[in-house]
């Protein structure tokens, strides 16, 4: 929820301008998730989108409403399908905007290719998303958004994130970069942040959401970094986090801070 609501806020701000943007998703996944699949048998989604879904007709913040409308566009009243980040971006960025979705796993790449076969502004890449950043940046468009969202299953993933981000910044420093990271598990998030500071990134906003206990079903503490955040998103993001905490992580904590000041 944190990643996708922040992504919606950033995309909404970017598409407000007339000039086209290129969106690159380095770890796109299959694009859409069937919540009735056995992978979701534990119904962890009930503590995430399940809690926000009833709010789609409420007076929630515009960024939340945009996110919920995007999810609703994949369903017919009843919540069954959940769009991944690439599907959200494809809904919000129509031509002349351009999208590049990278996926290394063959089955998920095939699912992506089927889903977006008729969407002419989408290019599907089978392979390493970090390598694609080297090929795609700088983009033909003057503006770009890059989402780096690995599963953090590899022990060296944090190094790969920082290395990929450093090379991307060398090619297109003014692009908007979003980097999602877990705050629990085998990876030390503080080490990731220290490594990021060593490559001297541009202005970077850090958002984190921590449930009261990570033992609750589906409750995962996580953060997202927004490098070069669009000006129009900064205040909305500051109000977004308290809303998410109240609905998804009551009793938990949230923070919105500059990791690298303006």
Image: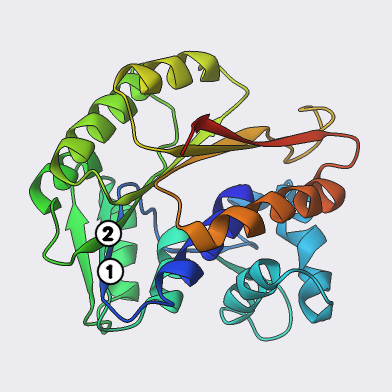
Query: What's the residue at 26%, 84% (across, down)?
Result: 118
Q: Residues within 10 Å of mark 1 (few under 14, many from 20)?
A: many
Residue 129 appears in the picture as rendered: yes
- Image: 161 above or below 27: above
Mark 2–mark 1 Cα distance, whole angstroms, equals: 5 Å
Q: How is the image coloured?
A: rainbow
The answer to the question of whether label 2 and label 1 lie on touching residues, with beta carbons closer than 8 A, is yes
Percent of width and height locating residue 17: 37, 77
**SS state under label 1:** strand
Q: Residues within 10 Å of mark 2 (few under 14, many from 20)?
A: many
Percent of width and height locating residue 184: 63, 23
Looking at the image, which is closer to me, 259 or 262?
262
Disc on res. 144: 2
Q: Is residue 114 left or right of residue 178?
A: left
Q: Which residue is mark 1?
A: 21
Query: What's the residue at 73%, 47% (across, down)?
Result: 44
Residue 84 appears in the picture as rendered: no
Q: As drawn, which residue projects farthest toward the front?
A: 262
């Amino acid at each position: 929820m944190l990643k996708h609501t922040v992504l919606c806020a950033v995309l909404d701000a970017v598409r407000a301008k007339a000039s086209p943007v290129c969106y690159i998703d380095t770890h796109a996944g299959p694009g859409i998730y069937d919540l009735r699949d056995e992978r979701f048998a534990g119904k962890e989604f009930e503590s995430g989108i399940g809690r926000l879904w009833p709010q789609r007709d409420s007076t929630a913040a515009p960024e939340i409403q945009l996110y919920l409308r995007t999810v609703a566009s994949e369903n017919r009243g009843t919540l069954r399908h959940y769009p991944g980040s690439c599907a959200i971006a494809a809904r919000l960025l129509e031509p002349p905007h351009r999208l590049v979705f990278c996926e290394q796993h063959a089955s998920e790449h095939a699912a992506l290719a089927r889903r977006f076969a008729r969407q002419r502004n989408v290019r599907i890449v089978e392979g390493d998303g970090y390598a694609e950043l080297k090929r795609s940046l700088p983009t033909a468009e003057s503006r770009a958004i890059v989402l780096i969202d690995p599963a953090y299953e590899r022990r060296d993933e944090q190094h790969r994130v920082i290395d990929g981000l450093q090379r991307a910044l060398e090619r297109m420093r003014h692009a908007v970069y979003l980097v999602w990271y877990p705050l629990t598990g085998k990876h030390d998030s503080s080490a990731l942040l220290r490594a990021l500071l060593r490559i001297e990134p541009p202005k970077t906003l850090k958002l984190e959401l921590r449930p009261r206990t990570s033992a609750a079903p589906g409750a995962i503490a996580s953060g997202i970094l927004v490098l070069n955040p669009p000006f129009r998103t900064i205040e909305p993001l500051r109000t977004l986090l308290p809303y998410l905490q109240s609905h998804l992580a009551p009793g938990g904590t949230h923070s919105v801070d500059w990791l690298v000041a303006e």
